[in-house]
Amino acid sequence: MRSLAYALLAAAVLALAGPVRAQEKQSENTEQLEIGISTDEIAISSDFRGADLTIFGAIGGYDPNLLAQSKYDIVVALEGPKDNMTVRRKERVLGVWVNRHSMTFELAPESYSLSSTRNVDQIASEQVLNSIGVGLQHIRLDPIGFIGDGSSVAAFREAFLHLKETGGYFQRDPGGVQFISASLFKATVKLPANVPNGTHVVRAQLFRDGVFISEKALPLRVVKTGLEQMISNAAYNRPVSYGVLAVVLALLTGWIASVVFRKD
């Protein structure tokens, strides 16, 4: 009888614990993230020298105690259009530098500007950052082809990141996200002077004490205007006519220069 009573008591405890655990799991992540930008399109003229884009956001359903302890972190990134990117490595052959090795990464962002409440590597573990592709060192770069030695993926990856950073396409600003009130924040991301044309994505991620909670994304179109846009459209939409016109203009420019600087 005593063993039967213990069994019934254990069954009752498990029955009660099940709904409690389910309820705890449902309420585990109660925070929501909202962001907004002042415009969904940016026009780039020929004299564009770069600009700052400000994103405002708010955390809903936050825990005031955790917020007071600075347990919440936010990462905001402006990701450019994605395309297959090839990195080449030169070697000296018979006194001439030639491309001997190359690797192509699938759908890598053409530009990437990052802001965060602090250094990204201090916000979450490497495993978490890799899983969601947050941070310059954690961007997803999947090789889809190579020429020559394709075993050193890490070396080509580092070379790709280095070229993008030195060229101004990849930027980071630890501390670029700041809380302006209890749950409101603002972030500043940079558009480089050579920002690529196309649809960009403003992406914000919320972390709580190293745990990824939620994400919000908004599209941002970057379009060229004026003469630069006309030339770009002609190059893409009518490549043959554009090529012929470029050759004619080059010949005409050379002829005019020879007449102007002719020595009698």
Image: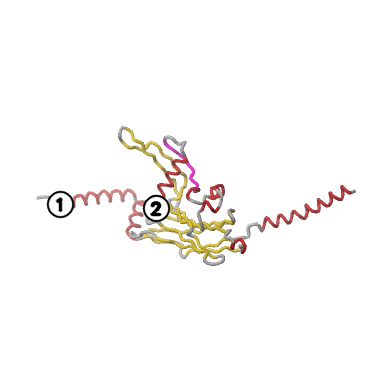
- Residue placed furthest toward the top: 94
- 3D distance between C-alphas at marks 1 and 2: 39 Å
Q: Quadrant of residue 30?
A: bottom right
Q: Are marks 1 and 2 in contact (CB under 8 Å)?
A: no
**Pointer 2 residue:** 168
Would you say residue 97 sits in the magenta stretch?
no
Q: Is residue 120 above or below residue 37?
A: above
Q: Position of residue 79 (x, y in %)?
A: 47, 54
Secondary structure found at label 1: loop
**Pointer 1 residue:** 261
Give, as a single range, the part of the protein colored magenta: 139-147
Q: Tell me if 168 is positioned left or right of 70 in this view.
A: left
**At 59% across and 61% down in the image, what residue appears?**
69
Q: Amino acid at mark 2?
A: Gly
Mark 2, other Cα within 10 Å: few <14 / some 14–19 / many ≥20: some
Q: Amino acid at mark 1?
A: Phe
Question: Which SS does the magenta portion mostly show?
Answer: strand
The tag on residue 217 is: none
Secondary structure found at label 2: loop
Q: Position of residue 200 (x, y in %)?
A: 46, 56
**At 33% across and 37% down in the image, what residue appears?**
97
**At 43% across and 50% down in the image, what residue appears?**
110
Would you say residue 141 sits in the magenta stretch?
yes
Q: Give the image's coloring scheme.
A: secondary structure
